[in-house]
Image: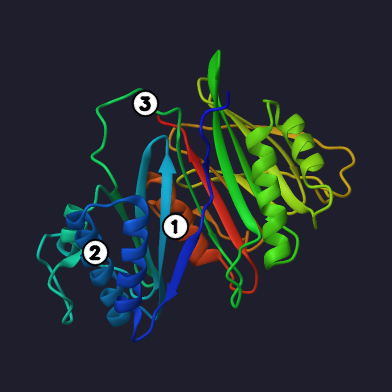
């Protein structure tokens, strides 16, 4: 059996505006009930959302909150992302001191958000903006278990004016002999419900495939997308012990091995999965310690460079994905990204 997948789910995007704190609290309360957060943890989440939203209103040129439910095994969580274009934070250490507050915010501050959350991460780009992540678990974290083969994070955003996204991602673990991971990034053609239908079909076919070679997994997804619009799609296999990645892609999915100061591209071949896939090719690359695998759709501009994101590869995958999507994404198309990080 394939291990339970980590995969894209519904993301609630809320843009900056006068009603952002109230809207954020309302949506957070709905998600808290959905995953079974206790009253206290729901109140903690509401406080964090309010502070993050107030910060966006007062300091950002443009910004958004993203709220979503994530689940793995029996654990569910509500995750908060606060993303902005703005001045950034010049003294992050001071901003993270518990009780620190500026410009008339609630007085809770980033430090208290960090204290309240089960998981917290922040990345700031002076003169460009800040990305914040906070996760709130439904149940107390279980006792230490086996270390995961890798950390995974991803994010999707629909085109402006749509509620359904045609981009999706999924990752599953294959502990067959030597542990490895399979990761998929999919961009359903067009946007709206029909693109989302293709994306859902791709995720289902990826989940059900028993193949472990990227080209064979892609072939299974190709069959699963018959009768849909089709998609640009790539499948990567990450061999954890050898720190190698193999990629088979069709269409305009961008795939990179991203280091602190380097970016190596893994190519895809032309075609549309579900319609016309001729000869596929598999490309390989090393995953040096400190690097991450990044796969994204053409909803992100692929001309971004590592030196534009100092310190980003040291962050958790969810924050890496969010910062790249916010800084390099476009609202003229669906956008999706998945990031895989192998422990050093």
Comparing marks 1 and 2, which lies closer to the viewer? Answer: 2
Badge 3 crowding class, 10 Å Cα cut-off, few under 14, some 14 to 19, many 20 or more, is few
Tell which of 166 and 41 is nearer to you: 41
Mark number for residue 147?
Answer: 3
Mark number for residue 309?
Answer: 1
Is residue 265 in view?
A: no
Residue that label 2 marks? 48
Q: What is the quadrant of the N terminus in the image?
A: top right
Is residue 107 in view?
A: yes
Give the x, y percent position of residue 152: 47, 41
- The residue located at (30%, 71%) in the rendering is 25
Color style of the picture: rainbow
Residue 209 in the figure: left or right of residue 251: left
Residue 26 in the figure: left or right of residue 336: left
Q: Earlier in the sequence, mark 1 or mark 2?
A: 2
Q: CA distance from mark 3 to mark 2?
A: 29 Å
């Amino acid at each position: 059996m394939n291990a339970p997948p980590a995969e894209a789910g519904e993301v609630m995007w809320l843009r900056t505006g006068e009603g952002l704190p109230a809207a954020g609290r309302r949506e957070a309360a709905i998600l808290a009930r959905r995953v079974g957060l206790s009253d206290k943890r729901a109140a903690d989440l509401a406080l964090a959302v309010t502070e993050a939203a107030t910060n966006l209103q007062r300091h950002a040129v443009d910004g958004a909150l993203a709220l979503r439910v994530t689940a793995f095994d029996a654990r569910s969580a509500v995750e908060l992302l606060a993303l902005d274009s703005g001045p950034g934070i010049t003294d992050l250490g001071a901003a993270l001191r518990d009780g620190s507050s500026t410009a008339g915010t609630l007085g809770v501050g980033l430090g208290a958000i960090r204290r309240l959350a089960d998981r917290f991460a922040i990345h700031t780009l002076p003169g460009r903006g800040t990305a914040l992540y906070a996760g709130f678990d439904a149940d107390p974290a279980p006792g230490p278990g086996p270390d995961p083969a890798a950390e995974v994070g991803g994010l999707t955003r629909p085109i402006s004016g749509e509620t359904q996204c045609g981009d999706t991602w999924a990752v599953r673990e294959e502990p067959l002999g030597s542990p490895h991971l399979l990761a998929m990034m999919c961009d359903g053609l067009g946007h709206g419900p029909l693109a989302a239908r293709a994306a859902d079909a791709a995720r289902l076919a990826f989940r059900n495939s028993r193949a472990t070679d990227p080209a064979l997994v892609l072939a299974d997804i190709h069959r699963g997308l018959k009768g849909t619009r089709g998609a640009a799609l790539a499948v990567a296999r990450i061999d954890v012990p050898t720190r190698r990645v193999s990629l088979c892609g069709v269409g305009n999915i961008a795939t990179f091995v991203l280091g602190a100061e380097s970016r190596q591209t893994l190519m895809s071949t032309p075609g549309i999965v579900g319609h016309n896939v001729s000869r596929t090719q598999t490309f390989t690359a090393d995953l040096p310690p400190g690097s991450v695998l990044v796969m994204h759709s053409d909803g992100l501009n692929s001309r971004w460079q590592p030196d534009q994101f100092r310190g980003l590869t040291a962050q958790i995958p969810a924050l890496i994905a969010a910062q790249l999507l916010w800084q390099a994404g476009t609202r003229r198309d669906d956008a999706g990204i998945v990031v895989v990080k192998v422990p050093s």
